[in-house]
Amino acid sequence: MKKEQLKMEINIEDFELLQKSIQLPRGYLLTRFKKGLEDSWADLLNASSFDSEWSINRIKDYFTCEYRLNGSAAVTYNQRVISATFASVHSGLCLPTPCRITDLSSENNVHTGIFDYVATHPEYRGKGLSKVVCISILDYFFTEMCYKRVVLNTDDWRLPAISLYFSLGFKPIINSEPVSIRWKKIHKDLERTKK
């Protein structure tokens, strides 16, 4: 049985403390979703160890929502999407205004954004590209959508991603003793990888 994903959050105050100016390597471009690159988005998501198959049609369907279109960020190199993330929607609803979510915390979630699918192609990892797309989407949530909080789901084994989320100011949502134990193990594993 698959473990329930872990949850993390960042609030606007923590985002405002973040150093947001990151230089992309020469030839790399930060952009939003563009038609004509659907195959490149699908290739990226398929190469990034997500548990489902992405096709050009699935990408097109996924981006029919204006919220996802505006809330997408990608780094391209030679017209190829090599790092990306996007805003998600709750329960399949596409709302141009802040969505209401209830499954990520017991707090009032009226002004909460949802982070989805942070991915960098394995050939391009280690260049800070995921950080660039994450900051772009956090800026979208906090500046354009006026959200007060952003949440995401992740897996225990995604240590590089969790390390990135910590560097951005995300904090674990700990709502039970088993979740607390899992986070303690992750912290130990992250410490080991630094040595």
Image (tube, rainbow, N blue to C red):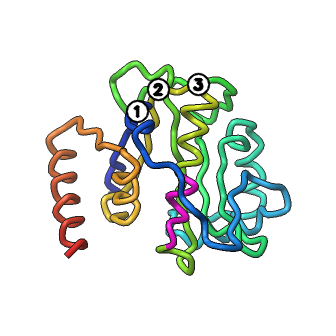
| Residue 90 vertical placement versus 167 (above, below) | above
Residue under pointer 3: 98
Residue drawn at x 57%, y 25% as measured from the top left: 146
Q: Nearer the viewer, residue 171 or 57?
A: 171
Q: Position of residue 181 (x, y in %)?
A: 15, 50
Is residue 161 inside the magenta stretch? Answer: no
Q: Position of residue 164 (x, y in %)?
A: 40, 58
| Label 3 to label 2: alpha-carbon separation | 10 Å
Q: As shown in the figure, which amino acid type bears the numbered disc 2?
A: Lys
Q: Which mark is residue 148?
A: 2
Magenta stretch bounds: 127-134
* Displayed quadrant of residue 185: bottom left
Helix, strand or loop status at disc 3 = loop
The structure residue drawn at horizontal position 19% and vertical position 66%, both measured from the top left corner, is 191
Quadrant in which the N terminus is drawn:
bottom left
Marks counted in the figure total: 3
The x and y percentages for residue 3 are: 32, 54
For marks 1 and 3 on the same chain, the one whose residue lies earlier in the sequence: 1
Let me know if residue 129 is in the magenta part. yes
Q: Are marks 1 and 3 in contact (CB under 8 Å)?
A: no
- In terms of secondary structure, what is the magenta stretch mainly? helix
Element assignment for label 2: loop
Who's the residue at 61% across and 28% down the image?
Answer: 145
Residue 184: mark: none
Of the image marks 2 and 1, the number of the one nearer the N terminus: 1
| Tag 2 near tag 1, CB within 8 Å | yes
Residue at which label 1 appears: 11
Q: Nearer the viewer, residue 131 or 103?
A: 131
Q: Few, some or many C-alpha atoms within 10 Å of disc 3 (few <14, some 14-19, many ≥20)?
A: some
Q: From what the image shows, is residue 190 above or below residue 6? A: below
Instruction: Tell me the crowding category of disc 2: few under 14, some 14 to 19, or many 20 or more residues within 10 angstroms, Cα based.
Output: some
